[in-house]
Image: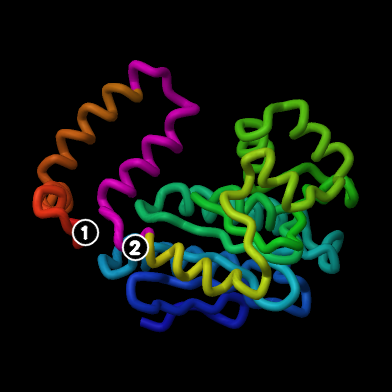
Amino acid sequence: MKLGNDHVAVDINGPVMSCVLNRPDSLNAFSDQMIGGLMEALEEASGNEDVKVIVLSGAGRSFSAGGDVKSMGEASAQHLYDHVGELNKLILKIKDVPKPVVAVVHGYAAGAGFNLALACDQILAAEESQFVLSFAQVGLISDGGGHYFLSRLIGPYRTKELLFTAEPIPVETAAEWGLVNRVIPIGELEEEAMNYALRLAKGPGRAIGMMKKIVDQSDKSDLAAILEQERISQTMMAETSDHKEGVAAFKEKRKPHFTGK
């Protein structure tokens, strides 16, 4: 099965699926074709037992500029409504896929490009990266889940300041606020990101997928509901081959060899 298209390059290398936003001349601004290609790749990753981790990055000078400003004002209201609807499906799919999705950011992550990164499970960023909710500059509100993700990560006051002013956040500030997992020199970013993805790929896949699900539901559930979900899920995990392997490896004083089963 051939994945990807002219606007998103998809490659599966061992347990890692790499999805590269591939409109470098427009700073990887979103297009219907790009969103469709990412959706197709995530669908494949969900059902492909060989894929353990998805890495999302951008070609050229930046991760993504978000919406394509050059085409704004030309599309009909119906097309905009449908386009944002497809973007919404993509954001929900990233959260739904039972495998880690790692955003690898360099240059700018702007507008919905910033929100696309926030939808991922981890963000690795180059030292010169900047993040900006640029919607107010063109008289729009945030789409792609920015209101949701940021208000939970940095609180409503900082979120509204970023939305209202559209001021860029340097990567150091993003890391200080807990928006970025790791800051990496640009020359080492690609290699470090792949090493990190391979490390995750060696983990207990079913347990990691379940942890992702529970963490993502924690802000919509009370403590009692999460405790019960943990109890049920732990019972399920105890029956997996990965758990048995982990216990055996511990007793034998060796590293476990997980299979995601």
Quadrant of the rendered structure where residue 185 is? bottom right
Say which mark, if any, is on residue 255: 1
Q: Position of residue 123 (x, y in %)?
A: 57, 54
How many numbered dots are placed on residues in this image?
A: 2
In the picture of the structure, the residue carrying the numbered disc 2 is 201
Q: Amino acid at mark 1?
A: Lys
31 displayed left or right of 3: right
Mark 2 / mark 1, whichever is N-terminal: 2
* Residue type (three-letter) at the residue carrying disc 2: Ala
Q: Residue at x 30, y 22 (%)?
A: 227
Residue range (magenta): 200-225
- Residue 105 in the magenta stretch? The answer is no
How many C-alpha atoms fall within 10 Å of the one at disc 1: few (<14), some, or many (≥20)?
Answer: few
Residue at image coords 43%, 64%: 197
Q: Which scheme is used to colour this image of the protein?
A: rainbow
Query: Which residue is at a point 66% across and 32% down the rendered structure image?
Result: 151
